[in-house]
Amino acid sequence: MAKIFCVANQKGGVGKTTTTVNLSAGLAKIGQRVLMVDLDPQGNATMGSGVDKRQLKLSVYDVLLESASVAEARVRAEACGYDVLGANRELAGAEVELVQLERREKRLKAALTAADGDYDFVLIDCPPSLSMLTLNGLCAAHGVIVPMQCEYFALEGLTDLVNTIKQVHANLNRDLQIIGLLRVMFDPRITLQQQVSDQLKAHFADKVFNSVIPRNVRLAEAPSYGLPGVVFDPQAKGSQAFVEFAEEMVQRIKGM
């Protein structure tokens, strides 16, 4: 049975897409079968996996509207080692169309259930806003991975996200929980970041992943080559940190 995780944070620019594609590549590298689902109409996770969003014959949009199955719409990202359920601009229209449909927040869950035996992990890249698309991701998932920078504004955004997850858990998805907080773009030389990191550990304890993703130029460069950093430059510190994170994820879900 596949473990389904949303990578979510209601604050923009915190590295959600970077986390999704690099964790997908890291998991694939250590032998896991992975499906990466792009739920953001910008399609950055799709492009960052080496899949041209403009060339997609079928996308997550078709899956949500039930005109295609996951098996029909997925594309193999050969260089990355995982499958992609891609997104493009069409997905922006799905917001409006879904509102009028039955089971509107459970459509992704139903589609992923049909492909359950094909994967060990399904990772969903969510848009920064709490939209019908994000809601589909949260309803389909067993848990949420929260990438966050160690800054004070990030702590405020985290409070909003925790409240959202509690509401979805209470009303729509009893399985949903925070799997863990991932510290990203971390620079240990900055005292403030160290202080916020310590606060996170004090408040969330074992919900904070041991893995820390450092601020890394090679990770930032990788998307312009259409690859996750883990594939683009496996020797980079950021890439190695994501492979360690993938190993930690595998260990953590064994205890779930």
Image: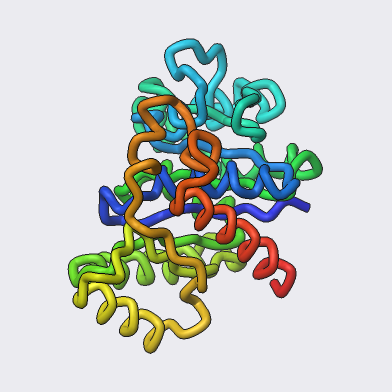
Query: Can residue 20 be seen here?
Result: yes
Nearest the viewer among 109 and 80 is 80
Nearest the viewer among 100 and 119 is 119
Query: Can residue 155 be seen here?
Result: no
Image quarter of residue 73: top right
**Count of labels shown?**
0
Q: Is residue 95 toward the left or the right of residue 113 in the image?
A: left
User: What residue do we see at 50% from left, 24% from top?
Assistant: 50
Q: Is residue 168 toward the left or the right of residue 156 in the image?
A: right
Counting from the top left corner in percent of width and height, residue 75 is at 62, 23
Q: Quadrant of the C terminus?
A: bottom right
Counting from the top left corner in percent of width and height, residue 97 is at 41, 29
Nearest the viewer among 242 and 37 is 242
- Figure check: 245 above or below 97: below
Image quarter of residue 141: bottom right
User: What residue do we see at 29% from left, 64% from top?
Assistant: 187
Q: Residue furthest bottom?
A: 202
User: What residue do we see at 46% from left, 63% from top?
Assistant: 168
- Figure check: 17 above or below 232: below
- Figure check: 47 above or below 29: above
User: What residue do we see at 66% from left, 30% from top?
Assistant: 70
Counting from the top left corner in percent of width and height, residue 160 is at 29, 67
- Colouring scheme applied when the structure was drawn: rainbow
